[in-house]
Structure formats: structure tokens, C-alpha cells
Image (cartoon, grey):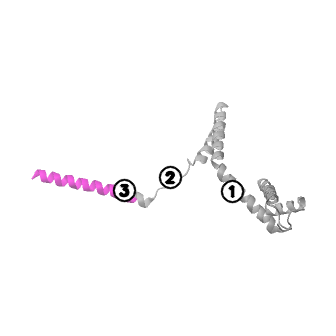
Amino acid sequence: MSGNRSSRAAIRVRVDIVYRLLLLGLDRQRIIDHVRAKYPSWPKSDGAIDRCIEQAEQMLIESGEAERPVEFGRSLARKHDLYTRCLNDKDYRGALAVQKEIDDLLGLKAPIEVNLNDARRELVELMLEEVMREAEDATAGAATAD
């Protein structure tokens, strides 16, 4: 290993520190400023710090993908609990607000999408079937009348 290269363990520690700074909401420039002020042993180049930021952002993405179903369930359960508490306290406005949040979370307020071309096509097919049935009935009736 060359003298200027950092060990994998050191890089992992740096990425973990940057990860925590991202969780605190620091942007790129503030992370760079913080690292330079607090960690003089870190590489001085923006590129090295940017690589740590990229790895930490990837960790955020991966943790979000894995935890989304759990967080969704937790959020829904908390909202249901809050709804029940509002009803128990006779806070109907609060209960309605919570129900609206639940509806939003579940997508219950999403507009219904109707494809007009498909709807027209289905309507025409139904009308055509009805006309054909009436025509068959009319010809069957005329044939029996003769």
C-alpha cells in the first residue's frame, strides 16, 4: 500500500462520519468545511471528500429502500393510533385531519383515471351488441311470422 492511500477501515470511518453529517442535513460545502476544520488527517482534496459523500449518499438510498415497508407500516399504525386517540378525546377535527393523512398515505384520494378512447370503444361495442341482438330478434320474429 502506498503512503498516501488510506486503508479501507479509515475510508469506512470517513464515510460513516459523512453519513451522519448528511443525516443532520449538511450540504456538500458544509460537509467539506466541517471535515477540514475537525479532521486535519483527512485528505485535503474536494474529490476525496466528494467520494465519501457519494458513498454515504448511496448508503442512505440503500437504507431507505430496505426500510420503506417497515416505515410505511409504522407510519400507518401511528396514524391509526392517533385517530383512535382523537376519537376518544372527542377531537373530531383532529380525527378528520388524521383520516385525511391516512387517505393520502394509502392513495385513496387519487383521481380515478379513465381512458376516454377505451371507454368509447367499450360503449360502441356494447351498443353494437345490443343492435345486433335486436336485429337477430327482429329477423327471428319475422321468420316465425311467415
Q: Is residue 12 magenta?
A: no
| Pointer 3 or 1: first along the chain | 1
What kind of residue is marked 1?
A: Ile
Q: Quadrant of residue 77?
A: top right
- Residue situated in front as seen by the camera: 7 or 29: 7
Per the rendering, the mark at residue 112 is 2
Mark 2 lies on a secondary structure that is loop
Residue at figure coordinates x 89%, y 62% from the top left: 41
Q: Is residue 138 magenta?
A: yes
Mark 3 lies on a secondary structure that is helix
| Pointer 2 or 1: first along the chain | 1
Q: CA distance from mark 2 to mark 1?
A: 31 Å
Is 74 situated left or right of 128 in this image?
A: right
Residue 125, position in %: x, y?
A: 33, 57
Magenta range? 120-146
Nearer mark to the viewer, of 2 and 1: 1
- Residue situated in front as seen by the camera: 121 or 53: 53
